Image (cartoon, rainbow, N blue to C red):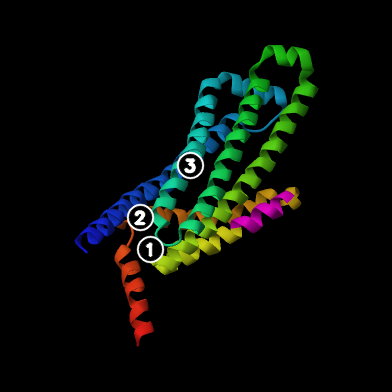
Amino acid sequence: MTQIRMEDSSTERTQRIYARVAGFLFLWLIITGLAGTLMISNIVGSGTFAETAKRVVASEHLYRVALSSELIETLSAVLLAFALYVTLKPVDKLLAQIAMYWRLGESFIGGAAMILSFLRLRLYTSPESLAALGTGQSQALVDLTRNAGFAAYNISAIFFSIGSILFCYLFFKSRYIPRILSAFGVFASVIVTIMCFASLIYPEHATALQYGWAPMAIAEVATGFWLMLFAVKTQARSDQQSARPASIHA
C-alpha cells in the first residue's frame, strides 16, 4: 500500500511539473509566433515586388530572425504536445496519444511550410534569381509560395485544432483545470477548425475569417497562466475515481 501511494505521489508530481511546462509553452508559442509574424509584416509592407524586395534586402538578417522565431514556435509545439500528453495520460492514455499525434502533425506540416518561407526570402534577395527569372516570373513564384504557405498554414491549424479539442476535452473530463476554462477551449478549438476549412474553401474571405482566432487566443492565454500558476488539481481526479466504487456499492 505504501509503495502504491509513493508511485501515485510520483505520478502526480510528474503531472504537475509537465503541466507547468505546458503552461509556459502555451505562452511561449504565442510570443514567438506573434513576434515573427509582426516583424515580417512590418518589413514586407505593401507595394510592388521591386519595392518589397528592396525592403527585405535592407533588413535581411532581421527577416531571418523573424523566420527563425516562427521556426522556434513550430519546434516548441512538439514539446507542448508531449507535455500535454504526460499531463493527461492518466485520464485516458489512448485519447491523449491521439491528441498528441494531431499536434505533432501540426508541427511537421508547419516545419515543411517554413521551407517555403525561406524560399520566398531567397527570391527577394538573390540577384541571380532576379536576373534569370525577371521581375514578372519572380513575382509569380513569390505568389505561388505564398499561396502554398497559406494552404499549409490552414491545414496545419486544422491538425492543431483537432488536437486541441481532444486535449481540452480531457481537461474537462478530469477537472484538472476549471471546467468553464476547458469547455471554452473546446468551443474555441471547434471555431478554429471551422474557420480553417472555410478559409480553404473561400480564400477570398480569409482575412475576415482570421478573427476566429480570437477565442483561441483567449483560451490559450488563460489556460497557460492557470497551468503555470496552479498546475493541475490531481486531487479532483482522485476524488472522482474513489467516488465510483462507493456509488456502485451503494
For the residues labelled 2 and 1, the Cα–Cα distance comes to 8 Å
Closer to the eye: label 2 or 3: 3
Give the mark nearest the N terminus, 2 or 1. 1
Residue 110 x %, y %: 59, 39
Q: Is residue 219 left or right of residue 16?
A: right
Magenta segment: does it hold 207? no
Residue 66 x %, y %: 51, 30
* Disc 2 residue type (three-letter): Leu
Q: Residues within 10 Å of mark 1 (few under 14, many from 20)?
A: many
Residue 37 x %, y %: 55, 37
* Vertical comparison of 167 with 115: above or below: below
Res. 35 visible in picture: no
Asked whether the beta carbons under mark 2 and mark 3 sit within 8 Å of each other, the answer is no
Asked whether the beta carbons under mark 3 and mark 1 sit within 8 Å of each other, the answer is no
For the residues labelled 3 and 1, the Cα–Cα distance comes to 22 Å
Local secondary structure at mark 3: helix
Q: Residues within 10 Å of mark 3 (few under 14, many from 20)?
A: some
* Disc 1 residue type (three-letter): Ile
* Vertical comparison of 113 with 189: above or below: above
Closer to the eye: label 3 or 1: 3
Q: Which residue is drawn at the image coordinates 35% and 49% (left, top)?
A: 18
For the residues labelled 2 and 3, the Cα–Cα distance comes to 18 Å
For label 1, the residue is: 177
Q: Which residue is drawn at the image coordinates 23% and 61% (left, top)?
A: 5
Q: Is residue 134 left or right of residue 91?
A: right
Residue 119 x %, y %: 65, 25
Per the rendering, the mark at residue 78 is 3
State the residue in front, 116 or 166: 166
Chain part drawn in magenta: 192-200
* Disc 3 residue type (three-letter): Val
For label 2, the residue is: 227
Give the mark nearest the N terminus, 3 or 1. 3
